[in-house]
Amino acid sequence: ISETTDFQLVGVGLTGNPACDAIFANPITLTVNIADAPILVVNGLLEICAGDAIDLSAFVEETGNPPGAIPITFHSGSPATGGNQIDPVVSPGATTTYYAFADAGGGCTAEIPVTVTVMPAGTPVLGSASLCSNDPPLDLGTLLDPAFPDGTWSGPGVSGDTFDPSGLSGQINLAFTSSEPCIEVANTTVGVSSGPEVINLTTDCAPDNLTYTVSFELIGGDPATYTIDGQPLGGTIFTSGPIEGGTPYSFEIDDDSGCGPQTVSGVLDCFCLSYAGTMDVASGPIVLCSSGNFDVAPFFNNDEFVGPDDALQFVLHSDPGNQLGVVYAVSNSGMFNTSVIPGNQAYASVIVGDDLGGGIDLDDPCLSVAAGIEIWVDELAFMPGPSQTGCEGDCFAWPVSFSGLPPFLVNVIVENGTTVDFGTLVSYTNDTIFHICAADYGLSTGTLTLTPLEMFDAECILIFNVPYTPVDFTWEKPPASDLLMTL
């Protein structure tokens, strides 16, 4: 029977002779109730991190009866009894199997195992690094634990997956949060050092004006290991011996930070009264992101002395230090235009010399030139390789070159024939190879089109107002062929 049914039970007296059998009066009615057997189902995968709790009742369902009609209990062992019943919220220390139990009455019960998998916590072991403050950005991928390649970095100087040490010093704490479950946040340090910096540079003539001395103070870096021309300084202030007037000076400054050396150079003729002063060379290079006017006057320390009949001007020139080399342009205010710079590098200095009535005599034997600050014109350019065609499912090696200061990032439109999306190309070098595989874009055959939109490097941005010609990657099925066999 499959439903509740009444049965009539009638008593019969048997004599061995059917003709003489007797049927008793007052039959008995027996009602048999049919209960729906409970059906227990585990929904989902029960996984937790070590130390977490989970509610078993949220994952077990009884489907043989109306919702909530049959109560479900949970137990630590099988068979389920009142003695091993537990609270449904559990926090096992290791992978554990529990048991869900349902009783529909009439001896109709169901029991099902419920296994909770406990995933052990892990902590990535990160590498560390030591950089100089003037080093290029660090690829943080070089510090990753190979077992945990995906995640997010955070901390001072972090941008995406790179760390820029400029403007930082000391031990910089960085954190890595893995994208995998149950993995603890890992920490590491990047040591940022800087070499010595020169301040308070002065030149003093002897009373007879035949010789002069150079003095300056060092700050930053590792003061205990300061050296001048390879010799320990033993302090922070340096004063040279007498230098013959008109003879250039040059001192190599270093320490044990590994971020040097740097050179301080100049010349002084004590019979020449004028002095061009100094540029803030340590703030260089001045990076210019686009064509147009720029001002170098803010980088002049205004420590000049201009004698009678002399004048002061700013000059753009080709050679570093106190040597002009080729003069590109001269300005009374310090304002220049990038169009006067051939290539992408120049130096800006202040010069003081004989006033020619609006100009300076560059052949003046007493011409004073401040050591120049470097100018860098960051000319961004994106030079992609050509379109490519191959067979179904191939991967293409696509060469791309960049002009500018790495790292580079190019945002592109990605079209695969059915969808349009946005993507990003990232390179840490000026020349790289990108691997374009059909499967990565949901294709086996067809055409993938990349259209560049904008480009970034370490300093600047370039918007492609006239978009680059799209680059196509086409995957084709091999041609069908018929094989005719003749015996």
Image (cartoon, rainbow, N blue to C red):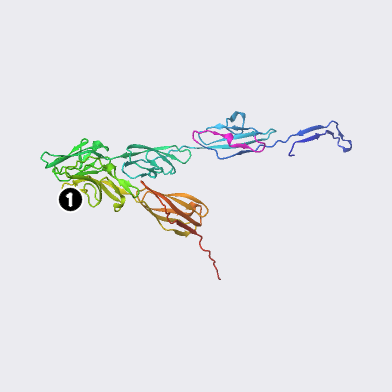
**Residue at the bottom extreme, as displayed:** 487
Where in the figure is residue 166, as x and y percent of width and height? 33, 41
**Residue at the left extreme, as displayed:** 208
**Residue at the top extreme, as displayed:** 83
Q: Viewer-proximal residue, 220 or 185? A: 220
Q: Is residue 336 above or below residue 55?
A: below
Number of numbered markers:
1
**Residue at the right extreme, as displayed:** 19
Q: Which residue is mark 1?
A: 363
Residue at 31% x, 52% y is 339
Left-right relation of 100 to 91: right
Left-right relation of 91 to 328: right
Quick one: SS at disc 1? loop
Q: Is residue 77 above or below residue 328?
A: above
- Magenta residues span 49-67
Residue 259 appears in the rendering: no
Amino acid marked by disc 1: Asp
Left-right relation of 94 to 219: right
Where in the figure is residue 383, as x and y percent of width and height? 38, 55
